[in-house]
Amino acid sequence: MKKEKVLEKLEKHCSEKRYTRLTRKKGTFEGITTGFILDKSSDFILLQETNEFRILGYQIIPIRTIKHVRYNKNDKTIERILKEEGLLSEVKAKYKVDLTDWNSIMKDIKATELTIISECEHPKLNYFCIGLLNRINKKSISIRYFNAQGILDKKNTKNNFEDITKLSFDDSYANIFSKYIIEK
């Protein structure tokens, strides 16, 4: 799909608050994300993710990684079911996030004091970094990462903005797991 068409569809689905299926790509990585586009800028979208008829947390996705935007009969059916189940009332932006650039995004998310998940899904880098956002630099962030056993690293982990393909916050995985982290 041409970039102009992607931008046009993102704008339309954002203004209409439609359930949307996005195909995202960076290098050889390709993945699918579904949800509702709550806000957008020229470079980023704020998406409230859905999965298996559940309304989940929030994601910031760079538009440059979005290769296809879909809203077809399948997506309309899912949206109808979410509506009939009374779940669309959960679709709303609980936080104001300035989507101008990574720095403004990170400042607003840092203010929430929520655990974040920064991901680079490109196969060569491929990282999943969960923890507290400690520092915002010109071209990167530093996260106090905790591993799959909930143990906090002693040092911060640096994530370059150019590598981040998805940033999640206020999702149940991060919110629940962060209550059980251990410092060793």
Image (cartoon, rainbow, N blue to C red):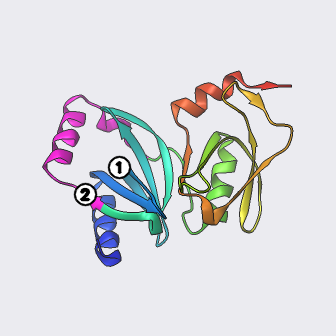
Q: Position of residue 64 (x, y in %)?
A: 46, 69
User: Distance from label 2 to label 1 (Cα)?
Assistant: 12 Å
Label 2 residue SS: strand
Label of residue 70 in the image: 2
Q: Is residue 67 above or below residue 167?
A: below
Label 1 residue SS: strand
Is 73 covered by the magenta stretch? Answer: yes
Please name the residue shown 62% across and 66% down the image.
162
Q: Is residue 50 above or below residue 163?
A: above
Q: Quadrant of the N terminus?
A: bottom left
What is the span of residues highlighted in magenta in the rendered image?
69-92
Q: Alpha-carbon neighbours of circle 1 within 10 Å: few (<14), some, or many (≥20)?
A: many
Please name the residue shown 43% across and 61% down the image.
25
Say which amino acid is labelled 1: Phe
**Which residue has dot 1 on it?**
36
Q: Main secondary structure of the magenta part?
A: helix
Q: Quadrant of the C terminus?
A: top right
Say which amino acid is labelled 2: Arg
